[in-house]
Image: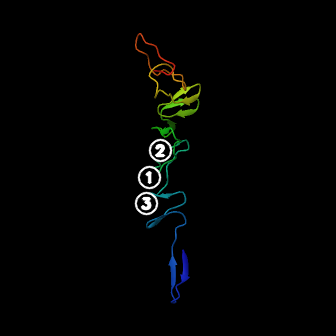
Amino acid sequence: RTCRDDGNGYTACVCTCRYADCGEACCMQGEVCDGMSCCFPKCEQDQMCGDDGCGGTCGDCEPGQTCNDNDQCVCQYETCGGLCCGLGELCLESACCEPDCVTRRCGLEPVCQTSCGECAEGSDCTVQGT
């Protein structure tokens, strides 16, 4: 509570919230305002992500990860040597790689050494993969 003389012989007092101001209420230490009322976020110690029960989250996952039903961050596509590969990437010797078959129709592509397709019977694949 802060009070001061208003200059007209009256004392004006204003109450300020010590932590979070939530409309008509003042939140206590550790509470957050969820828009209408004060709320204690409910994040378990091992919870990496997910709903905190107050309109927020208990954490954000890294790029390439998603929050699962157990509130843990897991790879969205493929796990590779402790990394998360992106959409369309493959795991090759504990590293993510993205196959390059855009200009190739057959043979091994040079980046991940995966097949870009097979040639028709009786024909051979060129070095360029056509």
Q: Amino acid at mark 2?
A: Gly
The residue pinned by badge 3 equals 37
Left or right position of 93 against 122: right
Please tell me how many numbered marks the rendered image carries.
Answer: 3
Alpha carbon distance from label 3 to label 1: 11 Å
| Percent of width and height locating residue 51 | 46, 47
Residue occupying image coordinates x 51% and y 63% = 20
| Percent of width and height locating residue 130 | 45, 21
Quick one: 49 or 100, which is closer to the camera?
100
Quick one: 67 or 126, which is closer to the camera?
126
Quick one: 27 or 49, which is closer to the camera?
49
Residue occupying image coordinates x 54% and y 29% = 97
The residue pinned by badge 1 equals 55
Query: Crowdedness of circle 2 by 10 Å Cα count: few (<14), some, many (20+)?
Result: many
Q: Secondary structure at mark 3?
A: loop
Quadrant occupied by the N terminus = bottom right
Alpha carbon distance from label 2 to label 1: 10 Å
Whether residue 93 is visible: yes
- For this orientation, the residue located farthest to the top is 122
| Percent of width and height locating residue 25 | 46, 65
Whether residue 80 is visible: no
Q: Are marks 2 and 1 in contact (CB under 8 Å)?
A: no
Q: Amino acid at mark 3?
A: Ser
Q: Is residue 67 above or below residue 108?
A: below
Q: Secondary structure at mark 2?
A: loop
Q: Secondary structure at mark 1?
A: loop
The residue pinned by badge 2 equals 50
Q: Amino acid at mark 1?
A: Gly
